[in-house]
Amino acid sequence: MNAILTCLQSSHDPALLALAALAALVCALGVYGSSSVARHAGRVDGTARRRWAAVGIVAAGCTAWATHMVALLAFQPGMQSGFDPWMTALSLLLAVAGIGAGLLVVVGRRDASRRFAGGVVIGTGVALLHYVGQAAYVVRGVAQWNHELVAMSLLVGLPLFGLSLAVSGVRNRSMRAAGAPLLLLSIAVLHLGGMAALQLEFDPRIELPSSAVSPDVLAPAVAIICFGLLCVAVIGLRLTLHAKAVLRRERLRLGELANLALEGLAICDGDRILTVNDSLATLCGMAPAEFVGRSLRSLVPGRDLLALPEREEADADVVTPAGKLLPVRVLRSEVRLGGRPQAIIAFRDQRERLRSEERIAGLPAHALELEVTENVVLQSERTTASHLKRLRAMGVGIAFDDFGTGYASLTMLKQLDVTRLKIDRSFVREIETNRKDQAIVDAVIRMAEGCDLAVIAEGIETKAQADYLRGRLPEGQGYLFGKPMTAGSFSLFFVEPAEPIRRTG
């Protein structure tokens, strides 16, 4: 530490310490500009994404290089000095390549270990820039290195680079804000440690190489790059403001659409709730504004809804301001707002369903039959199969509706524990004259008999259809036997004698 302080006091001209402050300003502007451009690259697609990503990488490399060069220009060794042009150019290329390689490691990734590794790669590129750049700094004297200080700058600086990138990828906004200050600190550690490690001793016998570039000649080039970084920062600011305006409009529009939904909806940025619709606010007994900024975990304690598989339903409990738990069914999906992923959590009130289950619970299980279709099963095959298996274990019958119309009906028949097949009306409409329909229906009947399944034909509307099916099927349903009716008419309906094909609806 004393070596670093001595370096700052004796090796930087007090009149030129303003250049050191300028270096810090250049670094801050460059970090803001390059990170803003990189975030914009994540919001667009295709060629635009690649172009903006390239601009961000080059801007980040130039930021590190310009910061280093401004600080070196402020360095006053007390002897004639200059810069090797090829080594100086190489240091810039190493910075751009190192930062680009590090960003490739972390692009699209949020896991901390991957982002930490990418940060270390970026730090390695900046370290190469720094020490190759210092090697490009030539004087009329002998350069000696303090290897302990070099090692210290690397051992402290590189983990700080990794930590800054890991923190910038977390969902917590307050923690994410610490990424940029950590990045600035890591750059400062590398620079100050490296400068303190370099000791120069004047030797009048040594002349500067003929190819050495004077600091006065290099300064305008550095100034041009600094001006370019300022422009990038301004562009980054405009892109950020535009993205925020677009995000506000999209959130407002999505909120308006959400209010048309009957189910409760919450739009979240990580664990932070951005907005909810009126349905969810009514369910919880709160005003929509009370949800904004609230943690999703505090609304649904004990469940990490963000970890749910997308579009797979799960049971949960929503806590009200009074501390009451309301049973809900939740479903998570993702959308991109302003180029950023946002989670949409749907909440379905389960209180009426649970009350219905309690009423049904008083009936014998064998008196109940549940109809399922292929589309319902395919929406969540594993979950639906599990639920149906539990219902069958209770004795509830399972009828496979619209059998034969889907592309996976036979597969479903094998996987699901059904008790009845319902032949779709499309095979019954011309059953008395169409040989193909007759063959299909007969085949389904034989298959059902082989699998010990009951069979019922749907859509029987004419006496000719009933006459053909009589003797082949014990049950049928359709408008021939009954149409929608009042409760009183329904009671009288079953007083009449039954047809040979039993009426089932």
Image: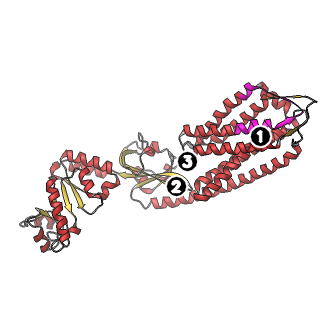
Residue 138 belongs to the span the image colors magenta? yes
367 relative position to 107: left or right: left
| Neighbourhood count class around disc 3 (C-alpha, 10 Å): few under 14, some 14–19, many 20 upward | few
The answer to whether residue 68 is above or below residue 434 is above
403 relative position to 174: left or right: left
Please give the name of the residue rendered at 48% of the width and 61% of the height, measured from the top-left corner. 256
Amino acid bearing label 3: Gly
Please give the name of the residue rendered at 63% of the width and 33% of the height, measured from the top-left corner. 159
Q: Position of residue 53 (x, y in %)?
A: 64, 52
Q: Position of residue 200 (x, y in %)?
A: 85, 29
Badge 2 element: strand
Ranked by sequence position, the earlier of labels 1 and 2 is 1
Which region shows up in magenta?
126-150
Amino acid bearing label 1: His
The answer to whether residue 345 is above or below residue 488 is above
The answer to whether residue 176 is above or below residue 381 is above
Observer-side mark, 2 or 3, equals 3
The quadrant of the image that shows the N terminus is top right
The quadrant of the image that shows the C terminus is bottom left
Q: Which residue is mark 1?
A: 68
357 relative position to 324: left or right: left
Q: Which residue is mark 2?
A: 336
Q: Which residue is mark 3?
A: 108
Count of residue discs:
3
